[in-house]
Image (tube, grey):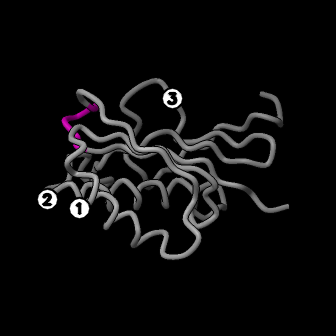
Amino acid sequence: MSAERQPITAEDAPAAVGPYSHAVRSGGFLFLSGQTPLDPATGALVEGDVGEQTRQCLRNLTTVCAAAGASLGDAVRCGIFVTDMASFGAVNEAYAEFFPDAPPARSTVGVAALPVGAQVEIDAIVALGD
């Protein structure tokens, strides 16, 4: 495998539900696959509203970053997928807890459905230090 493309597996994150890596390090960036709100200890969808699901997605992304020696606080872009655009406000409120200052660029897209019955999924791109 090329040094320019290094797959990352985070042992403390939920197992991938498909054929993908938790993240891939390449060209000074860490590209994180979308995380659904699965509890890493049980593999089950977390209970609670879309705000709690958003927090779990971001906790899972934080865990993947840590496995790569990075920090979610260095994210330059996040993508959010929601099954109900009416949840936009609740998602924003939970998201802001993780990015209180200088949040990354972001998009939010409404989708018909997400894996495992999740209401939200979040992916990220993180800038790595020199």
- The percent coordinates of residue 57 (x first, y second) are 36, 53
Residue count near mark 1 (Cα–Cα under 10 Å), binned few <14, some 14–19, many ≥20: some
128 relative to 117, above or below: below
Residue at image mark 3: 20
116 drawn magenta: yes
Residue at image mark 1: 52
* Res 49 → quadrant: bottom left
29 and 6: which one is in front? 29
Q: Are marks 1 and 2 in contact (CB under 8 Å)?
A: yes
Residue at disc 2, secondary structure:
loop
Residue count near mark 2 (Cα–Cα under 10 Å), binned few <14, some 14–19, many ≥20: few
**Magenta region, residue range:** 114-119
- The residue sitting at 58% across, 50% down in the picture is 77
* Res 23 → quadrant: top right
User: Of circles 3 and 2, which is in front?
Assistant: 2
- The percent coordinates of residue 1 (x first, y second) are 77, 27
Residue at disc 1, secondary structure:
helix
- Answer with mark 3 or mark 2, whichever residue precedes in sequence: 3
- The percent coordinates of residue 7 (x first, y second) are 65, 37
Q: Do the residues labelled 3 and 1 touch (CB within 8 Å)?
A: no
* Tag 1: amino acid: Glu
Residue at image mark 2: 48
Compute the Cα span from label 3 to label 2.
27 Å
Residue at disc 3, secondary structure:
loop
110 relative to 60, above or below: above
